[in-house]
Image (cartoon, rainbow, N blue to C red):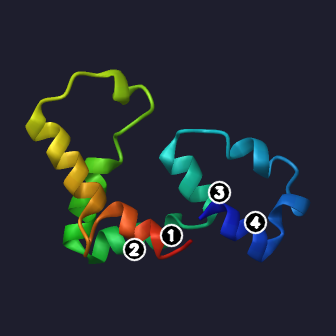
Amino acid sequence: MFLARVAQTGIIFEDKKFAANCWTHNVEDLFKQAGLKPVRDQDVATKPNFGANWLIAKDWSEVARYNSWTEAEAKKLYDALTEQTDGVLPWIQKYW
C-alpha cells in the first residue's frame, strides 16, 4: 500500500523523510504515511465488524511475536486479520 502511494504521488521526491518514516512497525504511523488513516477511521466507525477486527489487530507489535499466546488468542488475531468480508488484511489489499 505504501509503494502504491509512492508510485501514484511521487511523495518520496517531495518529502525526503518519507522513506525513513516508513521504516517502522508502528501500524498507526504506517497508515498515516500511506494516507489511509482517515479512510480507516471512517470504516472503523461505520463498519462494526471491521471496527471489531481492527481493535484486535491494532495492538500487535513486532515485540508481540515473541509473547506466548493461547490457541484461542492466536485464532482470534488470525481471524481478525484474515476474515474475508471485514478482515484487516483484505481491507489493506483494497488499497494496494
Q: Residue furthest left?
A: 72
Kindly identify the amino acid type of the residue bearing the numbered disc 4: Val
Compared with 59, 89 (above or below) is below
Closer to the eye: label 3 or 4: 4
Closer to the eye: label 1 or 3: 3
Kindly identify the amino acid type of the residue bearing the numbered disc 2: Gln
How far apart are the two marked residues, 2 and 1, measured between alpha carbons?
Answer: 6 Å
Which residue is located at x 76 percent, y 42 percent?
A: 20
Q: Secondary structure at mark 2?
A: helix
Which residue is located at x 59 percent, y 57 percent?
A: 32
**Circles 2, 1 touching at the beta carbon (< 8 Å):** yes
Compared with 41, 76 (above or below) is above
Q: Residue 29, how many percent across, how many down?
A: 57, 48
Name the residue that disc number 1 marks. 38
Left or right of 83 in this view: 94:
right
Name the residue that disc number 2 marks. 42
Q: Residue 90, how many percent across, how many down?
A: 37, 69
Left or right of 73 in this view: 46:
right
How far apart are the two marked residues, 3 and 2, measured between alpha carbons?
Answer: 17 Å
Name the residue that disc number 3 marks. 33
Q: Secondary structure at mark 1?
A: helix
Left or right of 16 in this view: 2:
left
Kindly identify the amino acid type of the residue bearing the numbered disc 1: Pro
Which residue is located at x 9 percent, y 39 percent?
A: 72
Label 3: few (<14), some or many (≥20) within 10 Å? some
Name the residue that disc number 4 marks. 6
